Amino acid sequence: MIAIMEVDEENPGSTSPTEASDLGPDSQTLVSSVHATPLQPIQPIVPSVVVPPIAPIVPPIAPIPSILPPPVIRPLAPLPVRPPVLRPPILQNGEVRESDSDSDNEDSGPTRTAPGTTGEYEISEESRLVRERQEKAIQELMMKRRAKALAVPTNDMAVRTRLRKLGEPMTLFGEREMERRERLRMIMAKLDAEGQLEKLMKAHEEEEAAATAAKADVEEEIIQYPFYTEGTKTLKDARVDIARYSLVQAALRIRREQRKRDDPDEDTDAELDWALGQAANLVLDCSEIGDDRPLSGCSFSRDGEKLATCSLSGVAKLWKMPNVEKEFTLNGHTERATDVAFSPVHDHLATASADRTARLWDTRGSLLRTFEGHLDRLARISFHPSGKYLGTTSFDKTWRLWDVENGEELLLQEGHSRSVYGLDFHRDGSLAASCGLDALARVWDLRTGRSILALEGHVKPVLGISFSPNGYHLATGGEDNTCRVWDLRKRKTLYTIPAHSNLISEVKFEPQEGYFLVTASYDMTAKIWSARDFKPVKTLAGHESKVTSLDVTGDGRYIATVSHDRKIKLWSSSSKEKEQGMDVD
């Protein structure tokens, strides 16, 4: 150990300053203890027996004590002092927050103090312009947010009224509804931001409340009654007459039904089977060219001895049955004729035309009366069962009731939203049914003038309508290619018949008992359907163009169809019972 210490003494500078500085208080204590220990005498060295080493053993080296000066503690350099950063004031809603980075304060170039700051906070001209654009964009965004939160009317008239209340022009040149509504929204948002919207609206509400109160005071003095259109005395007399007629006819119909039910000799099923057998045996009996222009309507007389037709040339013709021989030509309309109908009581017939008039004729071809009043072309025409009244439909969205005796207009009936096309009267005379291009059929009570049923189901215009003689079935046909049978007692559809491949132009029940239903269509055919279950019985095919109208004789022996191919086709039974009519009660 002494030898090692001597070596250390010979090399006093071997310890680096770093090592010296790393020595702590413990090292100093160790050095002092070494100096305090007395030196021992040196013992003689005895050589030891050399033994071959098995493995080298390296003893651990003890720490080398050294006498070092105390470490020098150098003072730390002072930290650089950063200048205080001036922050902009706290921002309110809608204002722009300026950048907090130091780089914004170090822009080169001409600078000036930003407005609104309390210290020497300077920004460049470019930054100021950018911030102004940002402020403007945020203000616009906040304005749009306010506008979206406001309740703006969707009705254009309400929008115009609100604009007028706010003192703005109701409309601008070329402005559409959505643009006008958006303009109102922005105006209200601007007023709301300025705090004036509530004040203006409150003032207008107070004005309206005052006006409403004044109006209510005036109305209290006037007795209010339900709205109605006051009719004439002739209409009142007509309604009374229709009520008396319908009561008698309804009593007869009920008595007849009771007799059929109670009489054991009455076999309704057998009569129905016989009528359907007659209908199934119908064949084409006669075909005749009716006019130079397409035919639009046809009607049998009450005894079945005459047939009337009309065409687009405006001419109506009378034909003698059963050979379809022409008797008279009825000239008088200035536009195309749209329909023709025989009176159920008298030997009169009526025609409708696109010249907005209906005309009454006798069977000798003399004009008896002209019915004028419609504002648009006429469509279909029908007589009341009493024969005293005539109903006409028109494209002016109304149907009208006329007095046959003097030609006076008794009733102008509105109710359809589009053109009225078809019209038919109940067998008792108490009800009328109309259909139109609004895909709706309506049932009217002629005794009170009320609409008692609105039959919704068709998806396209309804063109044909017919009451059944049984009193509670109603058939309609339209452009949706279907025929619907309605039960008036249940107020709903009883059957929906996918009858044709094209629109249905006319529907008619067999007029005596309603044992079968006939439909005409633009698919160039007419079809017969059983009234028992409304299954097909017979298809009358033979026309070369659209079938526009049809009619059935009172005994059900003949069916006449007219078409755009200008032909009249007469269909009759070919059985041995052809000469025997159906039993009439």
Image (spheres, rainbow, N blue to C red):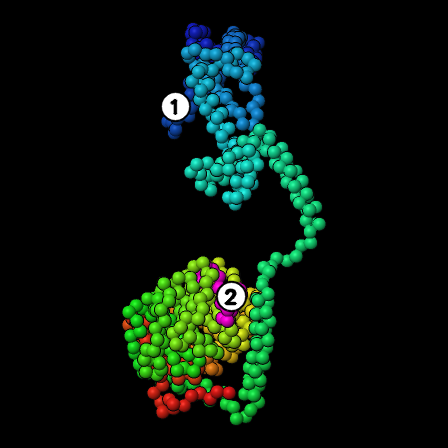
Tell me, for residue 408, which label it has, or none: 2
- Quick one: SS at disc 1? loop
Q: Amino acid at mark 2?
A: Glu
Q: Position of residue 256 (x, y in %)?
A: 55, 85
- Locate residue 473, reporting x and y percent: 50, 75
| Left or right of 184 on screen, residue 357 | left
Residue 574 appears in view: yes
**Residue 206 located within the stretch drawn in magenta:** no
Compared with residue 491, is residue 19 higher up or lower down, i.e. above or below? above
Q: Nearer the viewer, mark 1 or mark 2?
A: 2
Upstream in sequence: badge 1 or badge 2? 1
Residue drawn where x is 40% and y is 77% of the image:
363
**Residue name at image x 29 percent, y 74 percent:** 289
Q: Mark 1: few, some, or many residues within 10 Å (few <14, many ≥20)? A: few
State the residue in front, 333 or 420: 333
Residue 162: horizontal and vertical position, in percent?
A: 55, 39
Which residue appears at 41% of the width and 23% of the height? 49
Figure check: 115 above or below 516: above
Splitting the image into 4 quarters, where does residue 308 fall?
A: bottom left
Q: Is residue 456 visible?
A: no
- Which residue occupies 30% across, 71% down? 291
**Residue 476 quadrant:** bottom left
Depth check: give the residue in front, 427 or 124: 427
Question: Bounds of the magenta span?
Answer: 394-411
**In terms of secondary structure, where does tag 2 sit?**
loop
Q: Which residue is mark 1?
A: 50
- In three-dimensional space, the C-alpha distance between marks 1 and 2, rounded to whole angstroms, equals 160 Å
Image location (x, y in percent) of residue 283: 33, 83
Nearest to the observer: residue 242 or residue 554: 242
